[in-house]
Image: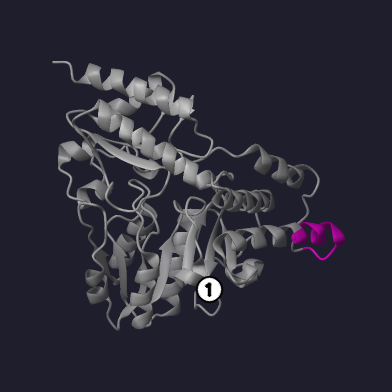
Amino acid sequence: MIYLDNNATTPVLPQVLETMLPFLTELWGNPSSLHQFGAQVAKHLDTAREQTAELLHAQRAHEIIFTSGGTESNNLALRGVLQAQPEKKHLVTTAVEHPSILMVCEQLEKEGYTVTRLGVDKSGALDLKELDNALTPDTALTSIMWANNETGVLFPIETISKICQAKNILLHVDATQAVGKVDIDVRKAAVDLLSLSGHKLHAPKGIGALYVKRGTKMSPLTFGGGQERGRRAGTENVPSIIALGKAAALAKERLENGDIKKLEELRNNFERTLLEKFDEIKINGATSKRLPNTSNISFEGCDGETICLLLSEVGIAVSTGSACSVGSLEPSHVLKAMGLNHKQAKGAVRFSMSCETTTDEIKKTTDALEKIISRLKKP
């Protein structure tokens, strides 16, 4: 199997699995317990929190709240902030967010909130003047992703933060796709809340985190014990938290040792090869700054799902976009927002690599694509 769907999920790295296993077999105590058996687990929990904070350059480890994943982190950020500011009823986001943001916004509208969804241009970029104009005294929160999960397009979070700060409006960033692929400094970017998901950076599914800057008002959504400093009740998922901490430490190493730069070169070479082989393709978001691992390509005259299925038959895993939208008959909402017509959007395929992807795997993929596209284009 050649796995090129790392924006959907990533394999748990052997080092991560090795680190978490003792907490399933030996160190299984409850970290909230007073006795030594629980206290020794709590120390490891603190280490994982510190490792996650270090990846984000957070000032304090306790600014990290462990959750079940990106979806919970996003829900907690939006609803938690809004509940803490009941006098404000307006939220600003974008038209290209992940469903875990957009669906929450749809529900909030049913509850009486007003939501402004910012559009993007054909390159996937935001109009920051539109953002500035959308912010009002009634705006409680702006929620904008760091990187788009389908195209990899990066948004200028530092600039966005300055616009929000000028009007004293909190900024939440869904960084689920960006964490571990680009350097994220929450202090430099001056974000108030930031979501991440473990299974996007080689930790298990079912674990994530929400960074909440010290002093940010946010109401909890679950009530029970005093875990996570009272902000997210429930006994901690210790093995997965330990795994996330290790995955965060390894991701930090990859950002520092040049592995991510090599990954970007591999992606760029892949795109150059395809542009040489095929005349009628479009690399979506190519003129914008993008994640180093992501390539979203429209094959004109072909159906993206058919390409995915035919690649799967020869052992190559890719996707047409967000795994959370599989089964939808509608083309990608992200590509539609970028102005692609129905055929271009339906012909899109997302290739998302990891630092485990090899040059040989990319060559096999381009060779397979050449045969498949030739077959689909036959009259």
Give the x, y percent position of residue 169.
37, 78
25 relative position to 368: left or right: right
Q: Position of residue 67 (x, y in %)?
A: 56, 58
Q: Say if 365 sits above or below 199 in the image.
A: above
Q: Nearer the viewer, residue 339 or 358?
A: 358
Asked if residue 148 lies in the magenta stretch, the reply is no
Q: Is residue 40 magenta?
A: yes
- Tell me: 104 left or right of 60: left
Q: Quadrant of residue 318?
A: top left
- Location of residue 128 in the rendering, given as x and y in whole percent from the top left corner: 26, 69
Residue on which disc 1 sits: 213
SS class, disc 1: loop
Q: Residue at x 22, y 60 (%)?
A: 119
Location of residue 170 (image quadrant):
bottom left
Residue count near mark 1 (Cα–Cα under 10 Å), binned few <14, some 14–19, many ≥20: many
State which region is magenta: 33-43
Magenta residues: mostly which secondary structure? Answer: helix
User: In front: 115, or 95?
Assistant: 95
Mark 1: amino acid = Lys
Residue 369 to residue 90: above or below:
above
